[in-house]
Image: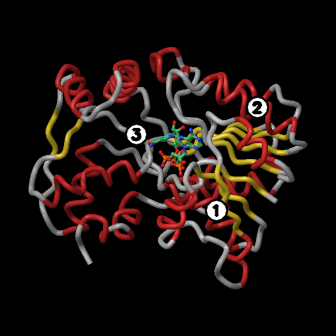
Amino acid sequence: MILITGATGTIGSEVVRQLAQRGEKVRALTRDPSKAKAKARARVPDGSGSGAEAAVEVVRGDYLDPASVDAAMSGASAVFLVGVLGPDDADRDRALVEQARAAGVHRVVKLSAIGTGDPAVGRVGSWHLPGEQAVRESGLEWTVLRPSAFASNTLSWAEAIRAGEPVPNMTGDGLQGVIDPRDVSEVAVEALLSARHAGHTYTLTGTELLSVPDQAAVLADVLGRPVVTEDLTPDESRARLTEWGMNTEYAEGVLAGSAYVRGGRNAVVTEEVRQVLGRPPRTYREWAVDHRAAFGES
Ligand SMILES: NC(=O)c1ccc[n+]([C@@H]2O[C@H](COP(=O)([O-])OP(=O)(O)OC[C@H]3O[C@@H](n4cnc5c(N)ncnc54)[C@H](OP(=O)(O)O)[C@@H]3O)[C@@H](O)[C@H]2O)c1
């Protein structure tokens, strides 16, 4: 049985779906199974279906409640680890790895982020390091996934686009190897199912380098309506993040990451999705076409 943490999130929900489709026995962890079931109608199979999808078991678990995580780990052979990214989460990430080891899990796949460990990224570049280190030192088979910016981040633009308002741009013309999250999930599934990926740290990107204005242009073309970007200075970005309710430490991390991208330092494209999956990554345009409905298009 494979335990998926972050099972209601962008990457985890798709990992659950893909594993279930392949007939694997899956346990999906969430803090609120009832909410998970509501989301599940769209994404996480809840075990009430027939065929392969009946293999998914949704369980309650909260990283802040170690006993619930221990119970969820029990009987798992492999675990997908989605920590909560933030300055306070290092201990939690380390604890998850220790709990997996203690439960007799033999394989862990950790979702990390591109730029991790690069001092130029600023504080956000260090948030995944303790978790990465813990999996590497765990004695278990491990794989670390360091994806670039998710295409799905632009879902946060939907409301502004529908309202005909500009979408905020905190990264100027900085280019990134934007990746379709479905490709990240597919790589995670391969790493969960095969020992071939043990001991690897994969930096996962799409095939093309795109700035926020580039993404806006693709989206405008796909949706057939204007998508205008609004350049924010770092101070304006800070004010916007605060307005959105983000705590100061986290906001400073986001700003440091934005400065890194703006300065062109995340302009990275790798071959690793292709190497693992044997096909090229999906493009941002493909992602946009498949998610038109989320922007109010049919
Ligand atoms: N967005 C990007 O561009 C990007 C790029 C590279 C890497 N990443 C990395 O991706 C990770 C986030 O993955 P995601 O976007 O798939 O997640 P997400 O959509 O933000 O979902 C977060 C998940 O974490 C779970 N969760 C939150 N707090 C929890 C707790 N206390 N106990 C147990 N579960 C908890 C949530 O489950 P419930 O609410 O159901 O409990 C949910 O499934 C981060 O580590 C980030 O660094 C993101």
Horizontal and vertical percent position of residue 140: 86, 37
Horizontal and vertical percent position of residue 12: 59, 54
Which residue is identified by label 3? 176
Which residue is identified by label 1? 16
Marks 1,2: beta carbons within 8 A: no
Instruction: Give the secondary structure at mark 1.
Output: helix
The amino acid type found where label 3 is placed reads: Gln
The amino acid type found where label 2 is placed reads: Val
Horizontal and vertical percent position of residue 24: 77, 68
Q: Looking at the image, tell me whether mark 2 or mark 3 is earlier in sequence order.
A: 2
Quadrant of the snapshot with the C terminus: bottom left
On the rendered structure, is 181 left or right of 167? Answer: right
Marks 3,1: beta carbons within 8 A: no
The amino acid type found where label 1 is placed reads: Val
Question: In front here: 84 or 186?
Answer: 84
**Crowd rating for badge 3 (residues with CA inside 10 Å; few <14, some 14–19, many 20+):** many
Instruction: Give the secondary structure at mark 3.
Output: loop
Q: Which mark is residue 6?
A: none
Q: Is residue 155 above or below residue 111?
A: below
Question: In front here: 127 or 69?
Answer: 69
x 14%, y 39%: residue = 230
Q: CA distance from mark 1 to mark 2?
A: 21 Å
**Crowd rating for badge 2 (residues with CA inside 10 Å; few <14, some 14–19, many 20+):** many
Q: Is residue 249 above or below residue 32?
A: above
Which mark is in front, 1 or 2? 1
Which residue is identified by label 2? 135
